[in-house]
Image (spheres, rainbow, N blue to C red):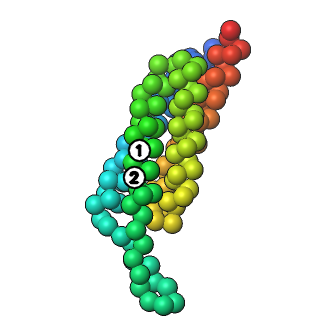
Amino acid sequence: MRSPQATGTAPDRTDRPLLAGGLLVATGLTDVLAAYGMLRSGSFIVLGEEGLYPVDVAGWTWLHLVVGAAVALAGLVAISGRRDAAAVAIGCAALALVVDLLLLPYAPIRLVLVAALDAAAIRLLLRHRRATRRAG
């Protein structure tokens, strides 16, 4: 299979926001479902020098749920390909990255994968914005 650069054709600009929107919808729904599961499971038990004690992360989990829903909605809006929609999606994905890093000790593997997909979506949207700015 030949790359677009080898054939002399430029990649379609509509592919980037479509892929980025799909990634954001997937990561947003993953965050919503994981946050719902964390809310239903209760407290975490931590072993310290003084013994076992529960750690309640319900507040952070509600934040994670709200941000996940916002990212999923921003992903749906980003599929439209508009520049202002891309800016909103980039902001929501950046906020999701911060929240994911705050909850990293509680679900490290899932959060690293979700954060990587959010970062990839941000990169695609930034490249789309740059391409639309050059095109006029």
Residue furthest top in the image: 136
> Residue 82 appears in which quarter of the rendering?
top right
**Residue beneath the point at 45% across and 57% down:** 60
Question: Are dots 1 and 2 in contact, CB under 8 Å?
Answer: yes
Residue kind at label 1, given as amino acid type? Val
Which labelled disc corresponds to residue 66?
1
The residue sitting at 32% across, 67% down in the picture is 42
Label drawn at residue 121? none
Front residue of 104/10: it is: 104
Task: Judge from the rendering whether residue 105 lies leftward or rightward of residue 3; answer left or right.
Answer: left
Q: Residue 98: horizontal and vertical position, in percent?
A: 57, 50
Give the quarter of the image for residue 127: top right
Which residue is depicted at the point 39% across and 76% down? 54
Q: Is residue 53 above or below residue 88?
A: below
Work out how far the residue at label 1 is from the one at label 2, CA to CA, in angstroms: 6 Å
Classify 10 Å Cα crowding around label 1: few (below 14), some (14-19), many (20 and above): some
Disc 1, SS: helix
Q: Is residue 94 above or below residue 38?
A: above
> Which residue has dot 2 on it?
62
Residue at point 52% right, 52% down? 99
- Depicted 26 relative to depicted 60: above or below: above
Between 34 and 18, the one nearer to me in the picture: 34
The secondary element bearing badge 2 is classed as helix
Left or right: residue 124 versus residue 110 is right
- Residue 70 location in percent, x, y? 44, 37
